[in-house]
Amino acid sequence: MKPTILTTKDLTKSFNKQGKLLKAVNNVSLELAFGESLGIIGESGSGKSTLANMIAGLIAQDTGTIQYNGDYLQMIFQDPKSSFSPKMCLLEGVMEGLRYRQKISTKEMKKRALQALEMVQLPKRYRDKKIGELSGGECQRAAIARAIVLKPQLLICDEITSALDVSIQLDIIKLLQKLKKELSISLFFITHDIAVVSYLCEQLIVLYQGCIVEKGETKTVLNHPQNPYTQELIQSVMTL
């Protein structure tokens, strides 16, 4: 059994909405092993992004615990442009995280940033481009480069393929699969796309109204769903 890089226990988060307390995440406990991918699926409003934001440290949980056993974790968002200054060239944008996180020379930062861009298949000719000059798929590759340049052991991906064309989605998923293997990265992958998790993730969690209604190996959950909501979710995809 592989050691775990991420463990949460009874995570809960509520928000005040129009005077009522809404539980966005309700007693969520999960484990993610080193080098594996965990998919989180569910409809809009199921608590997926709130869960990711708590694990990334962007918001605090109300109750429960988060244990992270790696050195660095990074989060990639649905809108990759939000991670870059529109005034910076791509190379500077990828280097930016290194300036604040790691004490290395400018020469070394530049070297690592170029390596990261190369790994996501954005060659040297892209280094001086601004984020606004790139296509949607290229922007997402740049965001991945900005994340992996810090050599994280965990990547949290929040709906990063949902705004892309289907062919571009597949390219990004294949890239993540390649990086996961080459860099020994664990993936916490949020999506509403069952096809994506079936391709990318070994483990799967289904969220409904902030609660885990089903979890297990991805193939088992998708081929033999036990919960009525999971069954309905899979059936809705099959009938499209």
Image (spheres, rainbow, N blue to C red):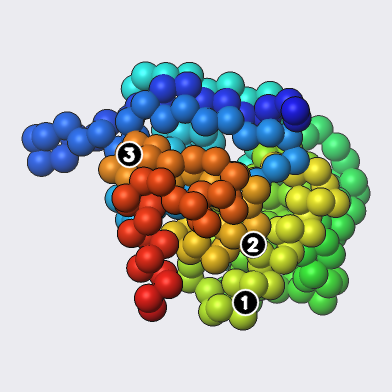
**Residue nearer the viewer, 201 or 140:** 201
**Residue nearer the viewer, 208 or 136:** 208
* Residue 140 position in % (x across, y down): 62, 65
**Residue nearer the viewer, 125 or 54:** 54
Callout 2–callout 3 Cβ contact below 8 Å: no
**Can you say whether 172 is above or below 1 in the image?**
below
Amino acid residing under circle 1: Ile
Callout 1–callout 3 Cβ contact below 8 Å: no
| Mark 1 vs mark 2, CA separation in Å | 15 Å
Q: Earlier in the sequence, mark 1 or mark 3?
A: 1
- Secondary element type, mark 3: loop
Q: Earlier in the sequence, mark 1 or mark 2?
A: 1
Amino acid residing under circle 3: Gly
Reading the image, the residue beneath label 1 is 168
Please state which of the two labelled residues, at mark 2 or mark 3, is closer to the viewer. 2
> Residue drawn at (33%, 31%), measured in percent from left and top?
26
Please state which of the two labelled residues, at mark 1 or mark 2, is closer to the viewer. 2
Reading the image, the residue beneath label 2 is 199
> Residue drawn at (37%, 56%), measured in percent from left and top?
231
| Mark 1 vs mark 3, CA separation in Å | 30 Å
Where does the C terminus fall, quadrant-wise? bottom left
Q: Is residue 183 left or right of residue 100?
A: right
- Secondary element type, mark 2: helix
Reading the image, the residue beneath label 3 is 210
